[in-house]
Structures are given as structure tokens and as C-alpha cells.
Image (cartoon, rainbow, N blue to C red):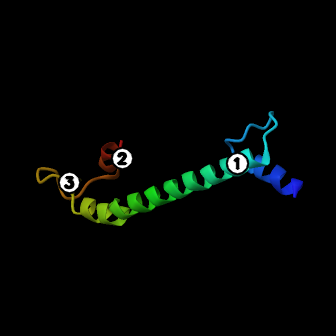
Amino acid sequence: MNDCYSKLKELVPSIPQNKSVSRMEILQHVIDYILDLQIALDSSVVLSRTRTPLTTLNTDISILSLQSPELPSELTADDRRTMHR
């Protein structure tokens, strides 16, 4: 059983490693850590639902043209290199 508490002490970042802590304190830290992880997980799920997928953004951008009407339709290789700089 002591090995289990030692392992919990190693895994939970809020537990001081260089200080002796009681089993009760370890369990309190573990519970707090699990709750913090649950909150972080819940908030990341909400963010992923509200974020616009990149594929939608890429589709919208694809309708834009890099060529303006006054530029000739046929560009030389040098012209293309200059435009991409």
C-alpha cells in the first residue's frame, strides 16, 4: 500500500516531493488534481465545438484569386517567383 501512495505522490504535480506528507494529504491532492483535469477536459471539449474547422476556412480562401484583372493571364516563371516572395 505504501508503494501506491508513493506512486501517487510522484504522479501528482502539486504534491511536494521534498517534504513528508500524510496519506490524507496525498489523497486530497489527488482528488484536486482529478477535478482540475476534468475541468480542463470539459473546457477543451467546449472549445473544440465552437472552433471553425480549418477545412471550412481553406474552402473560403480558395475562392480568392492572386491574379488581378490588369495582369496578363500567362505569367513567366520569373513572374511567378517574384509574386511568391
**Labelled disc at residue 81:** 2
- Neighbours of disc 1 within 10 Å: few (<14), some (14-19), many (20+): some
Q: How crowded is mark 2: few (under 14 residues within 10 Å), some or many (20 or more)?
A: few
Instruction: Tell me the quarter of the image containing the C terminus.
Output: top left
Residue 14 position in % (x across, y down): 67, 41
SS class, disc 3: loop
Could you say which is closer to the camera, residue 63 or residue 74? 63
**Which is closer to the viewer, label 1 or label 3?**
1
Q: How crowded is mark 3: few (under 14 residues within 10 Å), some or many (20 or more)?
A: few
Residue type highlighted by circle 2: Arg
The relative height of residue 46 versus residue 16 in the rendered view (above or below) is below
Identified by mark 3, the residue type is Gln
Residue receiving disc 3: 67
| Residue that label 1 marks | 12
Q: How far apart are marks 1 and 2 (CA)?
A: 54 Å
Q: Looking at the image, which residue is at 74% across and 37% down? A: 16
Decide: marks 1, 2 in contact (CB < 8 A)? Answer: no
Name which of mark 3 and mark 2 comes first in the sequence.
3
Residue 11, horizontal then vertical, whole percent: 74, 50
Q: Is mark 1 on a helix, strand or loop?
A: loop
Q: Quadrant of the N terminus?
A: bottom right
Say which of 42 and 21 sits in front.
21
Quarter of the rendering containing residue 67 = bottom left
Identify the secondary structure beneath mark 2: helix
Q: What residue type is labelled 1?
A: Val
Q: Position of residue 51 (x, y in %)?
A: 35, 59
Q: Residue at x 39, y 60 (%)?
A: 46
Separation of marks 1 and 3 at Cα, in angstroms: 56 Å
Q: Do the residues labelled 3 and 2 touch (CB within 8 Å)?
A: no
First-in-chain label (1 vs 2): 1
Name above or below for residue 20 compared with residue 24.
above
